[in-house]
Image: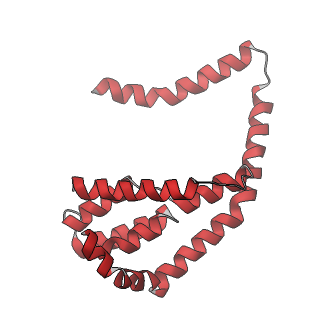
Amino acid sequence: MNFLYYLSDGIIPFVFIIIAGYGLLNKINIFDVFIEGAADGFKTVYKILPTLIGLMVMVGILRVSGSLDYLASLMKPVSRVTGFPSELLPLVAVKMFSSSAAVGLLIDIYKQMGPDSYLGTLASVIMSCSETIFYTMSIYFVTVKVTKTRYTLIGALFATAAGIAAAMAVV
């Protein structure tokens, strides 16, 4: 087991040494290439920043306004039929937009129900088997200028539903 700790501690410096060695062997100016890549990274951040800010503001408004709790109360009949706890509906809805906001809701669930409770355990598993669909789609599609997403949203929503169903089966 200690071998894995040493390996994990050394793998990142090893990768840097390999990359630098490859660049030196091929007579590539490593620093200039690094600066060019960093500049491209800043350009990407500049392009996606409005989308990130919009998503964060929207999730904050939904959370503070009580709209998520209202959604949960509206969906109670559906959740009774499916067996899904309505207390976790806000978590599932927010997770599709923002993982950090969902973590805030997860902590609230831990405080109210406890981390070892059924809802706490189910919420933890759901968090690990679902994706920030709208965040990921907006960031990646805006960055590479994709305008036709075809079946991406439907597939992502189906995968999230399958992950939630699997979480319910496992927990």
Number of dots carrying numbers: 0
- Quarter-of-image position of residue 161: bottom left
**Color style of the picture:** secondary structure
Residue at left offset 46%, top offset 84%: 67
Residue at 37%, 54% in the rendered image = 162
* Residue in the foreground of this view, choosing between 50 and 3: 50
Please tell me which residue lies in front, 24 or 92: 92
Look at the image and tell me in which quarter the C terminus lies: bottom left
The foreground one among 93 and 116 is 93
Residue for point 68% across, 17% down? 22
Give the residue displayed 41% in from the left and 86% down from the top: 70
Q: Position of residue 169 (x, y in %)?
A: 23, 55
Extreme residue toward the left, this view:
117
- Relative horizontal placement of residue 109, taking residue 105 as reference (left or right): left
The image position of residue 146, as x and y in percent, is 72, 52
- On the rendered image, what quadrant is the N terminus found in? top left
Is residue 132 shown left or right of residue 116?
right
Where is residue 40 shown, x and y percent of the image? 77, 44
Residue 57 vs residue 103: left or right?
right
Among the 4 quarters of the image, the one containing residue 25: top right
Residue 148 percent coordinates (x, y): 70, 55
* Closer-to-camera residue (30/130): 130
